[in-house]
Image (cartoon, rainbow, N blue to C red):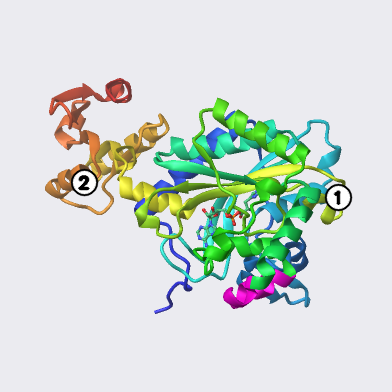
């Protein structure tokens, strides 16, 4: 038997219901917040991710799926969605459009060669938004509000926004120097990855999963003490707006994010949920004011977030949401050919009246059809009977009230519509 690749899974049955439900909620909210849909390719030139997510990030250095195509081009399966959106923004000259800022949302699979565990996959699905062309702290607050309220809407409880700022370039440079000075004498006590990070990108050390609990990192200088006035004021504005929006947040200076493109506000939404173990981060994002320029476009401030749909499916399944259980409006029962012909036509008519309808196609006996209708949670049973059909009558049984009536076949659709 050929099995699925490690770190992937099939979405079907309940998972499929939760998946569609979550996507529908996010798309509806994207419309309320006035974001437009964008779809970019699942594979892009490898260089795009090296220049955006960053050579020194774990994602690019250890986790990408890279291959040469038949034309000997270096291709990478996208590990995240921001880089592709920015590439598209530049390539399609969206910066020249009249309606600025450009507000986009996307949903799709991403690929990271991670060690699979609960809530951590090699093929993952993200929903994300990117706003290109606004540097206002209002925009940061809008994006955080979108993420937070959407997660709330799908039913996630006990969440908190962990927020930090990486400041502007000057603040980051000051902080970087202070961090290097502080960490240098402790280098021998850090893991081998961190020793490399020290040379390439010392801020990344704060994000280390191995050294997370070490006192060296706990006592490290904090970025908030190295912000210049402008960065500090901007961050305070974002916090003020979040307070005003009644969003539960906590300033956490250890949030530096695992991708290199961030500046100013960075945030993660974390749920207090044991079932997700160390995969409890539901969404992450922030500002990336230099990425468009680094990829060859005009200087454009941006902000966005992405959430992991697979983790949300796990959480919703735990909650066993009532409204997502199987249910059917009508089940039509027929046992002979004449009844089956009527059943096929009636099912078509009902479905086109937006009524969720099922009928038997396996020649089951009546008893078995009652059983299956129960299992499907059918509200109304339409019981066809040749004798009644000759008189132009159809029996309808209401599974809720247990009432059974015979209806004129010309009025059956109206009757069903008005009784659901
Ligand atoms: P990220 O933090 O790498 O950010 O991923 C966002 C979310 O995707 C995570 O919070 C998590 O829920 C989910 N996720 C990540 N890796 C996995 C995995 N292996 N399995 C399951 N879920 C996973 C980004 O990707 C940025 N592009 C977000 C962003 C958009 N920043 C600005 N705009």
Total labels: the figure holds: 2
Viewer-nearest of discs 1 and 2:
1
Q: Residue at x 64, y 55 (%)?
A: 221
Query: Which residue is tagged 1?
Result: 297
Q: Position of residue 306 (x, y in %)?
A: 59, 48
For residue 375, which numbered disc appears in the image?
2
The question of residue 266 being in magenta is answered with: no
Residue 96 bears which disc, if any? Answer: none
Q: Quadrant of residue 295?
A: bottom right
Task: Read off the magenta span.
Answer: 186-199
Residue 193: say if magenta. Answer: yes
Q: Label 1 to label 2, Cα distance in Å?
A: 57 Å
Residue 415 percent across, percent down from the top left:
28, 21
Secondary structure character of the magenta stretch overall: helix
Q: Is residue 33 above or below residue 335?
A: above
Disc 2 C-beta below 8 A from ligand 1: no
Label 2 neighbourhood size at 10 Å, few (<14), some (14-19), many (20+)? few
Q: Can see residue 264?
A: yes
Q: Is residue 346 left or right of residue 171?
A: left
Task: Specify whether residue 38 is in view.
Answer: no
For residue 140, above or below residue 371: above
SS state under label 2: helix
Label 1 Cα crowd, 10 Å radius (few <14 / some 14-19 / many 20+) = some
Q: Is residue 68 above or below residue 354?
A: below
């Amino acid at each position: 038997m050929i099995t699925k690749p490690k770190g992937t899974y099939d979405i079907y049955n309940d998972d499929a219901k939760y998946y569609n439900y979550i996507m529908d909620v996010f798309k509806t909210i994207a419309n309320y917040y006035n974001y437009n849909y964008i779809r970019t390719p699942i594979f892009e030139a490898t260089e795009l991710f090296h220049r955006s997510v960053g050579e020194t990030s774990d994602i690019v250095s250890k986790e990408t799926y890279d291959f040469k195509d038949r034309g000997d081009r270096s291709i990478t399966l996208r590990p995240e969605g921001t880089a592709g959106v920015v590439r598209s923004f530049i390539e399609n000259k969206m910066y020249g459009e009249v309606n600025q800022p450009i507000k986009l949302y996307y949903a799709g699979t991403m690929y990271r060669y991670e060690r699979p565990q609960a809530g951590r996959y090699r093929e993952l699905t993200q929903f994300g938004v990117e706003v290109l062309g606004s540097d206002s702290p209002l925009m940061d607050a809008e994006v955080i509000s979108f993420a937070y309220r959407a997660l709330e809407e799908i039913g996630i409880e006990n969440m908190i926004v962990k927020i930090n700022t990486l400041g502007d370039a000057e603040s980051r440079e000051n902080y970087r120097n202070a961090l290097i000075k502080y960490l240098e004498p402790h280098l021998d006590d850090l893991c081998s990855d961190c020793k490399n990070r020290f040379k390439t990108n010392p801020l990344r050390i704060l994000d280390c999963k191995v050294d997370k609990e070490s006192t060296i990192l706990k006592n490290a200088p904090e970025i908030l003490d190295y912000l210049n006035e402008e960065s500090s004021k901007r961050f305070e504005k974002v916090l003020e707006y979040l307070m005003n929006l009644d969003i539960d947040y906590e300033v956490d200076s250890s949030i530096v994010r695992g991708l290199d493109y961030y500046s100013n506000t960075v945030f993660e939404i974390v749920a207090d949920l044991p079932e997700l173990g160390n995969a409890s981060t539901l969404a992450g994002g922030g500002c990336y004011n230099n990425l468009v320029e680094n990829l060859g476009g005009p200087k454009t401030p941006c902000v966005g977030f992405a959430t992991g749909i697979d983790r949300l499916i796990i959480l919703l399944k735990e909650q066993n949401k009532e409204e997502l259980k199987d249910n059917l409006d009508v089940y039509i029962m027929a046992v002979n050919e004449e009844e089956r012909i009527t059943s096929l036509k009636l099912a078509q008519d009902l479905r086109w009246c937006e009524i969720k309808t099922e009928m038997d196609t396996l020649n089951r006996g009546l008893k078995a059809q009652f059983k299956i209708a129960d299992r499907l949670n059918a509200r109304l049973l339409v019981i066809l009977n040749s004798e009644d059909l000759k008189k132009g009558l159809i029996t309808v049984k209401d599974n809720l009230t247990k009432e059974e009536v015979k209806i004129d076949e010309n009025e059956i659709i109206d009757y069903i519509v008005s009784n659901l």
